Image (cartoon, rainbow, N blue to C red):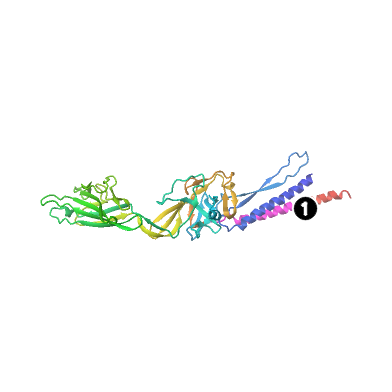
């Protein structure tokens, strides 16, 4: 029985070392595969109990393999903005293009740590191996709504419309200008100062808010009035007046030239002035338009100084209609579309998926993985938040294989295999001697 157990142990050694050689072969073959995770083979001894005194039965050895998914390869730069790699903990959610094309309900979420994604004929960000990037879609204003974090139900295939047009309506204006103080002196001509400010309506069409400033000229011998009537009209409404206010300026030594008060005219056209923010709200054709004229005592808005009319700082949000030029993914996973008008808009957010035991996932083709009971429940984090790392664009993750280490392990495996073969050869010779006893 002892000789037989020696033979069995030798066979088990051959099988275990063959398994280790297979994993080494797989590692070396994928040493240039982006995102490949190394396979490790461990040996475990087997002990047969119940052996009598003075005798021993060899149990042999058993090999087990595991894929070290939590080990990352180094990152290399690329020229494609949608080549993505995870730096640190976490994995990218992807789906099979075949599942999406079949449109048979929610597609299965797979996980990977890197991918080279480009738009296909339908605009999906897809890799050459047929993996489609998943993310949370943004609202029209670019904000990401609240989605469940313990399920993939909110994830959708990231689809880029490369022929997309976009325009942003103007909702805020900021006026920084100077009115001539001499125009409110007694005997001044009382000329109206005019200003036209462009804005964009809800369809991206250019319109104008026409603003007139009319000074209040006091009678001869009186002090300067320091008062102006500001009237606002909208070209989209055929020039109809949408706001009218009386501006009074301070002429004291400490606050001279700044707004002292803003009051509505008796016609009460437009929204009330908010002294806390310096804003007035008027009803333009496309909706409310917030205009900042400056806070009381503040020199950053409308002022009254010297003898010149000078618009010095006019700013606004919104933009005309523009074409999408490119798409990029930032470190926090936000997919941003850039337009030729200079604006950009968030269209998706790519979360990073984390699990308690990444090595417990089920390994599949194309460097993809599936959560399993051994890996634990997954959670979708914002990239860079919690335990996760960030997302690097223009980058790919190299294979985690150390070729020099694998070749060294191959030499060790070859020697161990030869030694086990020698054991079998020796046992065979001993059995031959036992057979010869009968002769």
The answer to whether residue 408 of the structure is visible from this angle is: no
Residue 26 relative to residue 318: left or right: right
Q: Is residue 204 magenta?
A: no
Q: In this view, which residue lies farthest toward the left? A: 221
Judging by the rendered image, the residue that carries numbered circle 1 is 425
Q: Position of residue 210 (x, y in %)?
A: 26, 56
Considering only vertical position in the picture, is 195 above or below 298? below
Closer to the camera in the image, 149 or 241 = 241
Asked if residue 93 shows in the view, the reply is yes
Q: How many marks?
A: 1
Question: Residue 410 in magenta?
Answer: yes
Identify the residue at horizontal 81%, vertical 50% (top origin): 430
Q: Provide the secondary structure element on which disc 1 rests.
A: helix
Q: Position of residue 356 (x, y in %)?
A: 55, 44
Quarter in which the N terminus is drawn = top right
Q: Which residues are magenta?
A: 397-424
Residue depicted at x 80% and y 51%: 428
**Residue 201 spot, x, y in % from top left:** 33, 55
Residue drawn at x 45%, y 52% is 348
Image coordinates of residue 439 in percent, x first then y, are 89, 50
| Residue nearest the observer in this picture, 425 or 242 | 242
User: Closer to the camera, 121 or 274?
Assistant: 121
**Of the pair 188 and 347, the residue shown nearer to us:** 347
């Amino acid at each position: 029985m002892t000789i037989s157990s020696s033979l069995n142990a030798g066979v088990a050694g051959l099988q275990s070392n063959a398994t280790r050689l297979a994993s080494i072969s797989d590692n070396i073959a994928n040493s240039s595969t982006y995102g490949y995770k190394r396979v490790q083979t461990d040996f475990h001894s087997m002990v047969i109990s119940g052996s009598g005194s003075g005798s021993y039965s060899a149990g042999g050895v058993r090999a087990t393999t595991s894929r070290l998914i939590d080990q990352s390869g180094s990152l290399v730069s690329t020229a494609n903005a949608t080549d993505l790699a995870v730096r640190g903990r976490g994995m990218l959610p992807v789906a099979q293009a075949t599942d999406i094309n079949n449109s048979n309900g929610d597609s299965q979420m797979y996980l990977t740590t890197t991918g080279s994604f480009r738009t296909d004929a339908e605009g999906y960000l897809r890799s050459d191996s047929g993996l489609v990037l998943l993310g949370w879609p943004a609202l029209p204003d670019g904000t990401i709504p609240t989605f469940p974090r313990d399920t993939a139900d909110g994830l959708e295939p990231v689809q880029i419309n490369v022929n997309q047009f976009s325009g942003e309506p103007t909702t805020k204006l900021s006026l920084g200008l100077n009115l001539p103080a001499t125009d409110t002196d007694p005997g001044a001509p009382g000329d109206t100062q005019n200003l036209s400010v462009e804005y964009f309506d809800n369809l991206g069409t250019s319109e104008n808010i026409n603003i007139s400033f009319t000074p209040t000229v006091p009678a001869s011998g009186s002090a300067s009035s320091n008062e102006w009537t500001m009237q606002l009209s909208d070209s989209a409404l055929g020039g109809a007046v949408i706001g009218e206010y009386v501006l009074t300026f301070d002429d004291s030594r400490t606050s001279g030239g700044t707004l002292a008060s803003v009051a509505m005219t008796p016609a009460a056209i437009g929204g009330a002035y908010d002294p806390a923010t310096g804003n007035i709200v008027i009803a333009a054709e496309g909706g409310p338009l917030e205009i900042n004229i400056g806070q009381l005592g503040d020199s950053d808005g409308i002022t009254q100084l010297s003898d010149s009319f000078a618009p010095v700082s006019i700013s606004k949000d919104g933009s005309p209609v523009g074409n999408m030029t490119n798409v990029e993914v930032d470190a926090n996973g936000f997919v941003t579309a850039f337009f030729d008008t200079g604006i950009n808009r968030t269209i998706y957010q790519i979360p990073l998926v984390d699990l308690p035991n990444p090595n417990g996932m089920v390994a599949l083709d194309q460097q993809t993985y599936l959560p399993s009971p051994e890996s634990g429940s997954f959670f979708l984090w914002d990239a860079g938040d919690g335990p996760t790392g960030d997302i690097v664009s223009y980058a790919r993750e190299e294979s985690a294989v150390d070729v020099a280490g694998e070749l060294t392990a191959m030499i060790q495996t070859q020697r161990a295999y030869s030694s086990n073969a020698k054991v079998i050869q020796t046992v065979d010779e001993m059995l031959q001697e036992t057979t010869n006893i009968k002769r």
